[in-house]
Image (cartoon, rainbow, N blue to C red):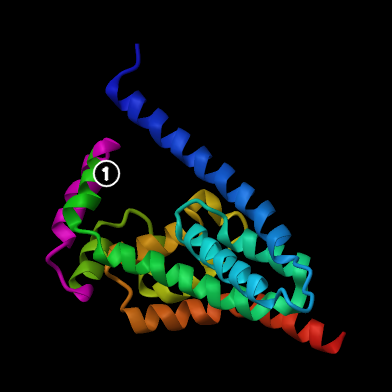
Amino acid sequence: MFTMKRRRLLVVVLIYFGLLITGAAVGRFLPDVLNLDVRPGNEPEIHSMIMFTTLVYIVAAAVPFIPGAEIGFALLVTLGASVAGLVYISMVAALTLAYLVGRLLPARAIAGCFGFLGLNRARNLVFRLQPLSTDARLKLLMSRAPARIVPFLLRHRFVALAVVINLPGNTLLGGGGGIALAAGMSGLYPFPAYLATIAVAIAPLPLLVTLLGYWH
């Protein structure tokens, strides 16, 4: 018989793989939908379909463990420079949405999730961090960090965020949506600085595709 901890782990694993499968399905679906045949007279339908597809992409990319960057890359490869701006704006919107959800989540709800997973030390840390300022949170986290690399990453957290957002295979770490959600939950990223960081971090690929399309 499964213990309670094993049952919880099984639920988490099933949710994890369910999100990965959902992300793969969305990634195959969206390029086909946006590869539309524009004809005289069907512009309103095309406009509605693009708006609907964009909304689906934003919501999907904001969900943890959904490979939003990979979906955006598939759209760029399939449709090229014509959707580069749309993909860029959608990804920024998705990561902003996930961040805001993280900022608005009550500490009790976050701690409850850790408690459900049996991560009691993490749950207690959430309660300790909740009333502290950003500087006080940084000092506490660095004082408890077991390795030298962790304080370094905390001090250079905006650079670390930009790197991990662009890290291949970051779906295993939660994907763009999960990373943005964690950034919001941590309280270590003021919104203006966070927005500027992701806006710059996401820009290179859509910009490159746009320039290649222009030169072509």
Q: Which residue range is magenta in the image?
A: 116-135
Which residue is more in the foreground, 151 or 25? Answer: 25
- Mark 1: give few (<14), some (14-19) or many (20+) Cα within 10 Å: some
Q: Is 170 displayed left or right of 29 in the figure?
A: left
**Is residue 168 shown above or below 188?**
above
Q: Is 128 displayed left or right of 212 in the figure?
A: left
Q: Residue at x 53, y 61 (%)?
A: 56
**Is residue 125 shown above or below 190?**
above
Q: Position of residue 58 (x, y in %)?
A: 51, 65
Residue 133 counted in the magenta span: yes
Q: Is 172 displayed left or right of 145 in the figure?
A: right
In what quadrant of the picture does the N terminus appear?
Answer: top left
Q: Position of residue 170 (x, y in %)?
A: 55, 56
Q: Residue at x 59, y 64 (%)?
A: 53
Residue most extreme to the front: 41
Q: Main secondary structure of the magenta part?
A: helix
Residue most extreme to the right: 216
Which residue is more in the foreground, 39 or 204? Answer: 39
**Residue type (three-letter) at the residue carrying disc 1:** Phe
Residue identified by numbered label 1: 114
